[in-house]
Image (cartoon, helix red, strand yellow):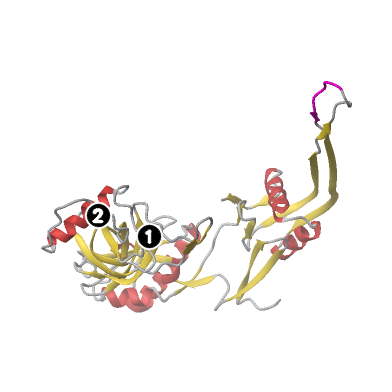
Amino acid sequence: MTNHSARWVTILSGVVLALVWIAGAEAGTSRIKDIASLQSGRDNQLIGYGLIVGLQGTGDSLRSSPFTDQSMRAMLQNLGISTQGGQSNAKNVAAVMVTATLPPFSSPGSRIDATVGSLGDATSLRGGTLVMTSLSGADGQIYAVAQGSVIVSGFTAQGAAASVTEGVTTAGRVPGGAIIERELPSSFKDSINLVLQLRNPDFSTAVGIADIVNAYGKSTYGAPIAEAKDSQEVVIQKPRTADLTRLMADIENLIVATDTPAKVVINERTGTIVIGADVRVSKVAVSYGTLTVQVSETPQIIQPEPFSRGETAVQDQTDIQAEQNGGNLAIVDGPDLRTLVAGLNNIGVKPDGIIAILQGIKSAGALQAELVLQ
């Protein structure tokens, strides 16, 4: 194929390796905003403890979860309702942990999503409503308040003798349910430089970003303004006459050539293999064979002779069958990705076999890539 505006990505999920051709503006190039983030524009995590009410008998058992009962009594007392008396047996309330991510440069009054997870023995949070919950940061300050209806993707159905559960019913989301109350301290406008952090650290990409930004700096301000500190950080000095916000807006849209090391990622649990575009395999011969052993137990009952004083006995009988398949020798040579995929497909083995073959090729020193096992 002569079009150089895309690249090959290889994914195995099932029995056969497949090549996926992903189109793009230009092969191996990306905007700076897509491969790097601003160091001063980091996210912040928030956490809080709250109650979900309105559950249809699927909440916490208050005797088994005393903290839920204590929290409910404290909430009612704050609302001016007396809670003196015996312990409640209601199962319409559940104690949850509430988490959210505070985006950079967020302003008070804007909304973010909140995630809830059960703390007690509630069986489902479906249909519940999160009561006003304060969300704090690592410094103990309250930055947001969450409240609203909980969306749960899973479901459960239960009868007298059986039950069915699909997905997770004890965790959910409150879309747009958290309102930001406090602004994060930010000194973006007062900064003297911009620090870009690569999401996938790579020296070649970091140097490429510095070169592209320096070319922009020379044409706009008459001097280079960027320096690659290491494989992850690129520091951009603010020109004296530049507005920092406009400078960042111009830089993040610059196109830079990206580079990544050759990797093969293997997930043995799901049988998924992802092979990068730059993976190469030296010429190697591969033989793969499977041995299947089947053990069958067929016990026999032995009866005593008539009018004898013998006892009925059980005699074990075991049948073992062994069958070996495959074993053909094939040559795998991967000077490019398409040839490597064709060679692996020609062997005709299942995903677990291809995983074993790739591990063997790596051990033989013929796989010119990093092998990542998940």
Q: Earlier in the sequence, mark 1 or mark 2?
A: 1
**Magenta span main SS:** loop
- The magenta segment: 308-315
Image coordinates of residue 141 in percent, x first then y, are: 18, 58
Residue 123, magenta (yes or no): no
Query: At label 2, which amino acid type do we have?
Result: Ser
Q: Residue at x 46, y 62 (%)?
A: 207
Mark 1 surroundings within 10 Å by alpha-carbon count, few (fewer than 14), some (14 through 19), many (20 or more): many
List x then y, in percent, for residue 132. Answer: 22, 66
> Which residue is denoted by mark 2 in the rendering?
88
Mark 2 residue element:
loop
| SS state under label 1 | loop
What residue is shown at x 30% (from left), y 49% (from top)? 65
Task: From the viewer's side, name the closer residue of 323 and 72.
Answer: 72
Residue 308 visible in the shown view: yes
Position of residue 128 in the picture relative to residue 304 (left or right): left
Tell me where residue 23 sits by quadrant.
bottom right
Whether residue 218 appears in this view of the structure is no
Q: Given the current orientation, which residue lies at the most extreme front position? A: 307
The residues bearing labels 1 and 2 have C-alpha atoms spaced at a distance of 15 Å
- Name the kind of residue labelled 1 in the image: Thr
